[in-house]
Image: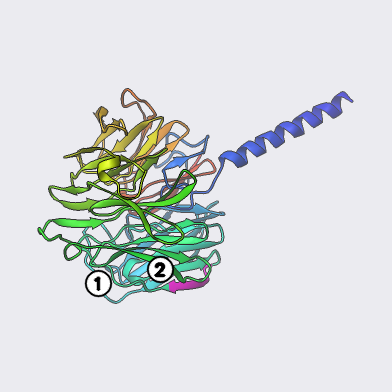
Amino acid sequence: MKQFFQILFLAFSSSLVLSSTKLTAEDWPAFRGPRGNGISLEKDVPIRWGPSENILWKVPLPAPGNSSPIVSNGRVFVTCAENKGRKRSLYCYDRTNGRELWVRTVNFDKVMPTHKTNNYCGSTPVADGKRVVVWHASAGLYCYDFAGNELWNRNLGEFEHIWGYGTSPILHEGKVILHCGPGKRVFITSIDLEDGKTLWETTEAVEGNGSRNKERKYMGSWSTPVVTEIDGQKLIICSMSLRVNAYDPKTGNIIWSCYGLRGQKGDLAYTSPVIASDICVAMGGFNGPAIGFRMRGSGDITSAQRLWQKEPNPQRISSGIISKDHLYMANAGPNTFQCLNPETGEIIWQERSGGAACWGSLVLVNGNFYVTDQNGTTHVFKLNQKHLEKIAQNELHEKSNSTPAFSEGQVFLRTFNHVYCIGK
């Protein structure tokens, strides 16, 4: 009888462990993870790695790129572009061993302008465990099943900007939400994941030629939308070049707008909005303003709800994270890390960290921040409200502009040369 209860106890304990694992282990199916905020529920992920440490597998890529890997239902997806964007591909790998399962390539004859650092594959794909959606900008929006069969595709028009494209699609309740731009025509659209049909499309006014505004200053937004909920109402939040908009997911109607992103060098937004409770923080690009506001009201809420606006700022391409009422940022130029008060914009601390500028976005995992700089070095530092507390600096000696993905105790990282799977 005693042995029976021991076995029963062990079985019960094992079920608790398995249940706990299911609660904490998750896919990373989109840019900035399953909730679009850069926060992972993983508990046991590597803190340290290098070329000969904790590398489970790596696979070569034919060309560099700025998109990030995603992980969904045993698959790893990443985009790549070759021949000046004439060849734009989606790669699918087995997450267990890195074996290439399939590649789907879209050929596009026209060479579009872009920045030398943006190699025609700046958009991260998104998946739901059965289907994967990839945006190749002017080359189209494509949906495949996990066997690589094309389910549908859409030509959404040409998107021409001197710096190229970089927004990523997200999924919300069976709909593909996509910020189409920058360029002469900019819009947010909702597309049915089942058949690729447009459900709504909301155009954003463009004051200029798409690359420069009427004052001949730079303009454009590369911001990926995020979904939030305020008082039971779902909202799609996106930073445009001049303002932050909240869209009704069902209709595309703009619920409210908050202005304040116009800067001395232009109308620019690179990062995704950062949200906690009813506060939203948005960053202007190219040293432009940062704003914080409450997501309340309707119409133009700038005067009623904007809490602060600060300019100039460091160059910000990396999206930040709000945790425990503190906003954490990794800056591109100079290479500094910051902790701010999201209600006031006050800088609580600002410190330099060795390494290159950070274009990849912050990820928070089990009380630690991870961010990969342009030299492919991933910095790990503790969540600390008083100062920068670095605990690891992991070098791979390969360039990178991407954000790592975290899933089931593993880290998936894209460099200019490889996709890595990192684990204990």
Which contiguous range is marked in magenta? 148-153
Report if residue 321 lies within the magenta region.
Answer: no
Chain-order first, disc 1 or disc 2 = 1
Where disc 2 sits, the SS reads strand
Q: CA distance from mark 1 to mark 2?
A: 18 Å
Of the pair 24 and 279, the residue shown nearer to us: 279
Which residue is under mark 2? Answer: 141
Q: Amino acid at mark 1?
A: Val
Report if residue 151 lies within the magenta region.
Answer: yes
Vertical arrangement, residue 354 with respect to residue 414, above or below: above
**Residue located at (34% from left, 34% from top):** 327
Vertical arrangement, residue 343 with respect to residue 189, above or below: above
Q: Position of residue 209 (x, y in %)?
A: 17, 66
Q: Amino acid at mark 2?
A: Leu
Q: Position of residue 94 (x, y in %)?
A: 53, 56
Q: Looking at the image, is mark 1 or mark 2 nearer the viewer? A: 2
Which residue is under mark 1? Answer: 111
Q: Are marks 1 and 2 in contact (CB under 8 Å)?
A: no
Of the pair 310 and 202, the residue shown nearer to us: 202
Q: Is residue 374 visible?
A: no
Where disc 1 sits, the SS reads loop
**Residue located at (71% from left, 31% from top):** 13
